[in-house]
Image (cartoon, rainbow, N blue to C red):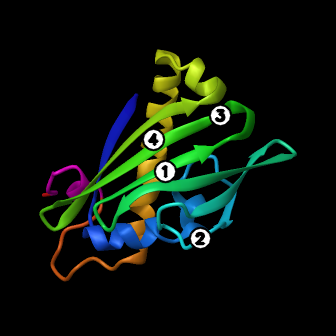
């Protein structure tokens, strides 16, 4: 199981706005080239989005289904990656003062990835999550202006003040 967290210098509603837009999935999910709405109304339970991944000149498609959600507190997804199987991706969105702490918990669920799950895969997911959560923070912070007088940027994200 790979669990990682990221402090985002915006309120939970700003994080939820990005998470609830299926066209934005490719903006923050590492490895995804494009995304677009699938079935239902994202991110309601049972709704889906379709995504593409490029590997060289090949383009592969997958889809992700919402399994649980409670806006703007948590979102749980099942990503279907064809022959590799599926993965459970849970996003826990917690108010943290004027900011938001996002905790991602991902693990293989079905298929080959679920059967072959090991520490090496968890290490890969940790690296992927570092990039994914950084991209999510950048997307949220870009889309939502910082409240007047609030500190933002790397110093705020790491609990340090310059000067």
**Which dot, 1 or 4, sits closer to the camera?**
1
Magenta span: 154-162
Q: CA distance from mark 3 to mark 2?
A: 22 Å
Query: Is 105 or 146 nearer to us in this picture?
Result: 105
Q: Closer to the observer: label 3 or label 4? A: 3
Return the residue at label 2: 40
Residue 22 seen from this side:
yes
Tell me the SS state at disc 1: strand
Disc with the residue nearer the chain's start (1 vs 2) = 2
Work out how far the residue at label 3 is from the one at label 4, CA to CA, in angstroms.
19 Å
Count residues near mark 2 (Cα–Cα under 10 Å), then give few for <14, some for 14-19, many for 20+.
Answer: some
Disc assigned to residue 77: 1
Secondary element type, mark 2? loop
Q: Secondary structure at mark 4?
A: helix
- Camera-near label (3 vs 2) is 2
Which residue, given by chain and number where applicable, does mark 4 sit on? Answer: 129
**Image location (x, y in percent) of residue 92:** 31, 52
| Quadrant placement of the C terminus | bottom left
């Amino acid at each position: 199981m790979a669990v990682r967290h990221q402090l985002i210098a915006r309120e939970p509603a700003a994080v939820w706005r990005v998470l609830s837009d299926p066209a934005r999935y490719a903006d923050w999910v590492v490895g995804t080239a494009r995304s677009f709405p699938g079935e239902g109304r994202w991110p309601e339970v049972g709704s889906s989005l379709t995504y593409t991944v490029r590997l060289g000149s090949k383009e592969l498609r997958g889809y992700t289904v919402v399994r649980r959600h409670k806006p703007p507190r948590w979102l749980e997804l099942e990503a279907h990656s064809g022959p590799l199987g599926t993965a459970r991706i849970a996003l826990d969105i917690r108010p943290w003062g004027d900011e938001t702490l996002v905790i991602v918990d991902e693990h293989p669920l079905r298929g080959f990835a679920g059967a072959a799950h090991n520490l090496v895969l968890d290490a890969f997911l940790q690296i992927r999550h570092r990039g994914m959560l950084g991209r999510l923070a950048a997307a949220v912070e870009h889309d939502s202006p910082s409240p007047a007088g609030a500190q933002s940027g790397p110093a705020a994200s790491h609990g340090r003040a310059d000067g």
